[in-house]
Amino acid sequence: MASIVTPKLLAHRAEFYQQLASLLSAGVGMLQALDLLHRSPPARSFREPIAQVRRCIQEGQTFAESLARQGHWLPPFDLALVQAGEQAGRLAECCRLLSGYYQERAQLIRQVLGNLAYPLVVLHFAIIIFPTSQLAGLLQNTSLIEFGLAKLTLLLPAYAAAFAFIYLSQAQRAEPLRSLLERACAWIPVVGTARRHLALARLSAALEALISAGVTMIEGWELAANASGSPALRRTVHRWRRGLESGQTPAELLAASPAFPELFSSLYATGELSGQLDETLRRLHRHYQEEASRKLQLLARWVPLLVYFAVMLVIAYQIVVFWMGYFRGIGEVLDF
């Protein structure tokens, strides 16, 4: 898996799963489907992993095992769903779910980046222009190199912070780092809630697929928690093993856990008692996926506006400082 996940890579994953689902639904065998995808992959970088997966299947491994052998090419969420879909005979359906998931993520990220383009251009222009004393010095006696270094001292830390945030939030880093990032994001309005809803949506989808595949409740919950991408949920669920082995139900443990919202706990308990847990988990997945998408759409609209507003404040401050200095200079001349 790439260190930085871009909208283009997400779109390629969506296309990969969509093509695979279409071929499998049409009755094409897995080896033949992979052979077709190898000839016309969504991206050139997919060609070698697909060839490796095909070789592993020819050696007698399952599709899920072959994907797991490719290191970090695919995230745990994908592997959990593929494994469950393969065991339950619903591989094409799981591939369609993954395709829709990645297509929506790519669209949201493109929207955010598109909305941020103009404010970022304005921000860079403001940094070059202000403070005007540096620009005036460039026109008089300051060298272009000194002027460029002065601007880079402002831009490079911002670039480094943005890159570090994206890298740590997307890549498979050590759990302490991801836990720290998760706790930090929890304090950010909208962002923390959106991340939590996405984790719950992933957990619900993976758990429904795993239970339908006949995986035991203990193993299913632990695999689904790993696939959620949330270190907090993973730690919480893995602490349940002793209770589950002693006869407690997941609904009882959910009710006593502050890591899960009350809605999730109550709906899960209802599904567990009614014997319709699979339908309940699908409903939870849809609910939290829609809530996360709604909040991410809100973020896509408001973040560019906030950046633009901050840039306007900086420009206004610089203009006020310039005119204050100008009138101060006039006053000093008159007093003299």
Image (spheres, rainbow, N blue to C red):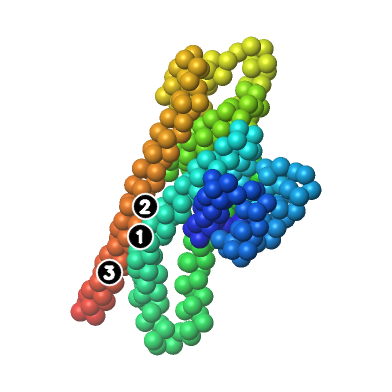
Task: Give the number of marks.
Answer: 3
- Image location of residue 179, percent across then percent down: 58, 39
Which of the pair 335/166 is nearer the observer? 166
Q: Mark 3 points at which residue?
A: 319
Which of the pair 165/10 is nearer the observer? 10
Which of the pair 191/87 is nearer the observer? 87
Label 3 residue SS? helix
Alpha-carbon distance for marks 2 and 1?
7 Å
Residue 140, image quadrant: bottom left
- Image location of residue 2, percent across then percent down: 61, 56
Alpha-carbon distance for marks 2 and 3?
30 Å
The amino acid sitting under disc 3 is Ile
Q: Name the residue under label 1.
A: 115
Q: Which residue is rendered at x = 67% and y = 42% of the image?
A: 64
- Image location of residue 229, percent across then percent down: 57, 40
Among the two numbered marks 2 and 3 on one chain, the one whose residue lies closer to the N terminus: 2
Labelled pair 2, 3 in contact (Cβ < 8 Å): no
- Image location of residue 332, percent across then percent down: 25, 76
Q: What label does residue 300 carry, if any?
A: 2
Q: Which residue is rendered at x = 48% and y = 28% of the image?
A: 281
The amino acid sitting under disc 2 is Ala
